[in-house]
Image (cartoon, helix red, strand yellow):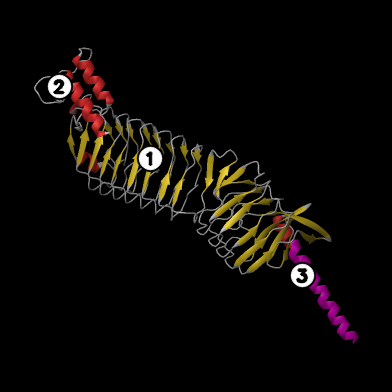
C-alpha cells in the first residue's frame, strides 16, 4: 500500500511539473498565460481574459463561460478575439455570456452550420466580418448598446432578417434591413430577404458591401437623392439584370463588379465620376452610354466586360485611364469626344474585336491626342471615323438629344438671334423653307414623342 502511495505521489508531482513547465514555456516565448476550458482556449490579460481559439472539432451548442480560473483567480471573459471560432463548421449554436464586451473581426467566420447566436446587452462593439459565411444563420438581433463594424454578414446566404433594439443609438432596422439610426445610410441587406427591393427615399448612402453577394437579388430601385453607391455595394449580385444610376450618385470602386447577369445599365445625366472597377467583370453587359456629366472614369472601370460591344463616351471626358476597357474582347466600336487629349497605357488592352472608333473631332484633333502605344495596339489599328455625329430626328442644336432645347434653338434661329453654319436639319417640315412653321412642326413632333 505504501509503495502504491509513493508511485501515485510521484506521478502527481511529474504531472504538476510538466504542466507548469508547459505554461512557463508559453509565458517565456509569448509573454502570455493561457488555459483551456473544454475546446476553448483563453488568454490572461491582467484583470480579464479573452477567448482566443476554439478547436475546429468542436460541435453542437457551445456555451462560453463568463469567468475562467487563472492562478486561483476567476477572470471575466470580455473579448472574443479575431477568428476565435473561424471555420468551426460543426458548431450549431453559441451562447455568449454578459461579461463579453467585444466581438472581434472574423470571430465566427465560416461557421457554416451556426443557426443561432445570442448577443448580450453587454457587447458594445462587433467588428468587421464577424459573421461572414455563416451560411445557416437565418436571423440576428443587435442589442441596445452595440455598435457595428462594416460587412458583418457577407456570405450569410440564408440570412433573412437583421433586427435592432429600438433604443440602439447607432443603428435601426426597417423591414429587416440594417440602416444607421437616421435611416440615411443603408448598411446591410440580408442575402435571403427577397429578389426585389426599393431603397427608401431618404437614403443618401448605400454603404460598402451593403448588398454584396446577394445572388438572389434580381431587381433594385435606387432613388434620386442617393449620393454614394459605396465600394462593393452590389459586388457579386449575379442575379441582378438591370440598374438605373440616379443623377445624384457617385459610383464607387467595385460597386457592381462581377454582376454577371447585368444586361442593362442606365447612368443618369448628373453622375460625374465612375470609380475604379465599378463595373468590372459585368460579362453580360453589351452596351453602355456614359452621359456628358461624367468627367472622370477611373482605372479598370469596365475591365473584363467580355460581352461589351459598343460604348458611347461622355463629351466631357479628357482622359481614358489605364485598363478602363481591358480584356473587353468583343468591343467592336466606341464613340469618343473631341476634347480628349490622353489615352493611357493598356486602356484597350486585349480588345481584340475593336474595329471602329467614331471620333467627334477632326483628323488633326485626333493626331493631337496622346495615345500610349503599350496595350493599345488594337485601338491604333482600328478605323477612325472623323467628325462623327449621331443623327437624331429633331436634334437641331446637335447636342445628341431631341428635346425642348431644340425648339428654343430653332425659334431663336428663325427670329435671327441664333446663328449656325449647318442648316441641314432646320427645315423640319420639309417644305424647302426655314420659318416658324418648322418651329411648330418640331414642337408637335417632340410633344407626341414624349
User: What's the CA distance linking mark 3 and mark 1?
Assistant: 60 Å
Q: In front of the other: label 3 or label 1? A: 1
Badge 3: residue crowd in 10 Å (few <14, some 14–19, many ≥20): few
Q: Nearer the viewer, residue 6 or 40?
A: 40
User: What's the CA distance linking mark 2 and mark 1?
Assistant: 41 Å
Q: Name the residue: 24% across, 39% down.
A: 334
Q: Nearer the viewer, residue 121 or 414?
A: 414
**Relative to 428, does residue 131 appear above or below in the rendering?**
below
Badge 1: residue crowd in 10 Å (few <14, some 14–19, many ≥20): many
The image quarter containing residue 161 is: bottom right
**Residue extending farthest top:** 416
Magenta stretch secondary structure, dominant? helix
Can residue 395 be seen by looking at this rendering? Answer: no
Residue on which disc 3 sits: 18
Q: Earlier in the sequence, mark 2 or mark 1?
A: 1
- Image check: 111 left or right of 11? left
Q: Position of residue 299 (x, y in %)?
A: 38, 40
Q: Secondary structure at mark 2?
A: loop
- Image check: 327 left or right of 169? left
Q: Secondary structure at mark 3?
A: helix
Q: Earlier in the sequence, mark 3 or mark 1?
A: 3
Residue 423's mark?
A: 2
Residue on which disc 1 sits: 299
Q: Earlier in the sequence, mark 2 or mark 3?
A: 3
Marks 2/1 in contact by CB < 8 Å: the verdict is: no
Q: Name the residue: 62% across, 54% down.
A: 82
Amino acid at each position: 500500500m505504501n509503495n502504491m502511495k509513493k508511485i501515485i505521489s510521484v506521478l502527481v508531482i511529474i504531472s504538476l511539473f510538466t504542466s507548469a513547465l508547459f505554461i512557463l514555456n508559453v509565458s517565456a516565448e509569448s509573454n502570455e498565460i493561457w488555459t483551456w476550458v473544454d475546446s476553448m482556449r483563453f488568454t490572461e490579460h491582467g484583470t480579464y481574459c479573452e477567448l482566443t481559439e476554439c478547436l475546429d472539432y468542436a460541435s453542437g451548442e457551445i456555451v462560453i463561460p463568463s469567468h475562467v480560473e487563472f492562478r486561483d483567480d476567476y477572470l471575466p471573459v470580455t473579448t472574443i478575439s479575431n477568428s476565435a471560432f473561424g471555420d468551426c463548421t460543426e458548431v450549431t449554436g453559441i451562447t455568449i455570456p454578459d461579461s463579453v464586451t467585444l466581438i472581434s473581426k472574423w470571430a465566427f467566420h465560416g461557421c457554416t452550420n451556426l443557426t443561432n447566436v445570442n448577443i448580450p446587452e453587454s457587447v458594445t462593439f462587433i467588428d468587421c466580418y464577424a459573421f461572414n459565411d455563416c451560411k445557416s444563420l437565418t436571423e440576428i438581433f443587435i442589442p441596445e448598446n452595440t455598435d457595428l463594424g462594416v460587412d458583418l454578414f457577407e456570405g450569410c446566404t440564408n440570412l433573412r432578417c437583421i433586427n435592432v433594439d429600438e433604443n440602439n443609438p447607432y443603428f435601426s432596422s426597417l423591414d429587416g434591413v440594417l440602416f444607421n439610426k437616421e435611416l440615411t445610410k443603408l448598411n446591410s441587406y440580408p442575402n435571403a430577404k427577397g429578389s426585389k427591393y426599393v431603397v427608401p427615399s431618404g437614403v443618401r448612402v448605400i454603404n460598402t458591401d451593403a448588398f454584396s453577394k446577394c445572388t438572389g437579388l434580381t431587381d433594385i430601385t435606387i432613388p434620386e437623392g442617393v449620393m454614394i453607391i459605396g465600394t462593393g455595394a452590389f459586388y457579386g449580385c449575379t442575379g441582378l439584370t438591370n440598374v438605373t444610376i440616379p443623377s445624384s450618385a457617385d459610383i464607387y470602386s467595385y460597386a457592381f463588379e462581377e454582376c454577371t447577369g447585368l444586361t442593362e445599365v442606365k447612368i443618369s445625366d448628373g453622375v460625374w465620376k465612375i470609380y475604379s472597377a465599378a463595373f468590372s467583370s459585368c460579362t453580360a453587359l453589351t452596351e453602355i452610354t456614359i452621359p456628358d456629366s461624367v468627367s472622370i472614369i477611373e482605372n479598370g472601370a469596365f475591365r473584363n466586360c467580355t460581352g461589351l460591344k459598343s460604348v458611347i463616351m461622355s463629351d466631357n471626358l479628357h482622359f481614358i485611364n489605364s485598363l478602363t476597357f481591358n480584356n473587353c474582347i468583343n468591343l467592336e466600336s466606341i464613340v469618343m469626344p473631341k476634347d480628349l487629349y490622353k489615352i493611357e497605357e493598356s486602356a484597350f488592352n486585349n480588345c481584340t474585336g475593336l474595329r471602329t472608333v467614331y471620333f467627334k473631332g477632326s483628323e488633326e484633333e485626333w493626331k493631337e491626342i496622346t495615345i500610349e502605344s503599350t496595350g493599345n495596339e488594337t485601338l491604333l489599328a482600328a478605323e477612325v471615323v472623323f467628325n462623327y455625329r449621331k443623327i437624331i430626328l429633331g436634334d437641331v442644336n446637335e447636342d445628341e438629344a431631341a428635346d425642348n432645347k431644340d425648339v428654343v434653338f430653332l425659334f431663336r434661329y428663325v427670329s435671327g438671334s441664333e446663328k449656325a453654319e449647318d442648316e441641314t436639319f432646320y427645315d423640319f417640315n420639309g417644305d424647302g423653307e426655314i420659318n416658324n412653321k418648322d418651329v411648330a412642326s418640331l414642337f408637335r413632333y417632340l410633344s407626341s414623342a414624349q
